[in-house]
Amino acid sequence: MFNSFSVPAQSQVLAFEAVRLTTGLEWIQVDLDTPQLPQAPGVYAWVDAAAPNGLRYHGNGSGKGGLHRRLTDQLRWRANQRHRLGVDERSLTEQDAYDLAREVPAVQQAAGDRHLHYAIAEPASWSIDRSDIVPPREAREWESFISAVSLLVTGHRGLVGGGAWESKAGTIDQLMTDLAWDRLVDVSGGGWL
């Protein structure tokens, strides 16, 4: 319908291997046909199979029901989005077009050729030689940490969403940005600078 109104654009994305390496968490790939999702709090990553393995979107499941509740919603929305995208665009109703346009960014990003991974939130297995910042322990801190790694490596917190307001002085995001810098220096042996 509006294909002639858009053009492709390129952007740097964080490699999922960098997420694995810097977090040190055990990441589990979800079988999207028969997802087994834990009730525990944790972080998740939608990874682009064609990027290759670039982080498209990440978040946390820290509320009631943890990752299970958060990702069950996203997987249901993903199925709905894939169904609507599979419809011949000439037969899209105005409501279909509206529904496609208003989907949350996570769903829009996940509807394509993506893999989903999750990690249970637990205290970091690594430490940094600093007394002013404690490594991540819970889901929200891990999400902020991954955002900070992305900011430092690619120049933005995430391909979808994320902005400078998230790293205001004294916030978890600002602390995780400082920590991410030290962790990146540590895991790269200082060679990435």
Image: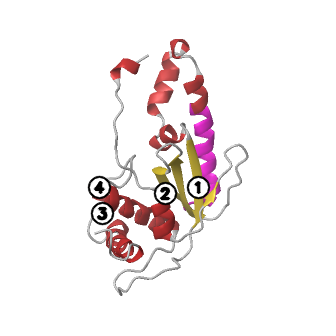
Residue contact at pointers 2 and 4, CB within 8 angstroms: no
Q: Which residue is farthest front?
A: 191
- Is 63 included in the stretch rendered in magenta? yes
Q: Residue 117 got which mark?
A: 1
Query: Reading the chain from its start, which is encountered first: label 2 or label 4?
Result: 2
Q: Which residue is mark 4?
A: 155
Q: Secondary structure at mark 2?
A: helix
Mark 4 packing: few (<14 Cα in 10 Å), some, or many (20+)? some
- Could you tell me how far apart the alpha carbons at marks 2 and 4 are, in whole angstroms? 16 Å
Left or right relative to 86: residue 184: left
Whether the residues at callouts 1 and 2 have beta carbons within 8 Å, the answer is: yes
Residue contact between numbered discs 3 and 1, judged by CB atoms under 8 Å: no
Element under disc 4: loop
What amino acid type is highlighted by mark number 2? Phe
What residue type is disc 3 on?
A: Ser
Hey, what amino acid is under mark 4?
Gly
Residue tagged 2 = 16
In the displayed structure, would residue 33 be above or below residue 170? Answer: above
**Residue identifier under label 3:** 167
What's under tag 1, amino acid-wise?
His
Q: Residue at x 66, y 45 (%)?
A: 32
Q: Which residues are magenta?
A: 62-81
Q: Is residue 161 magenta?
A: no
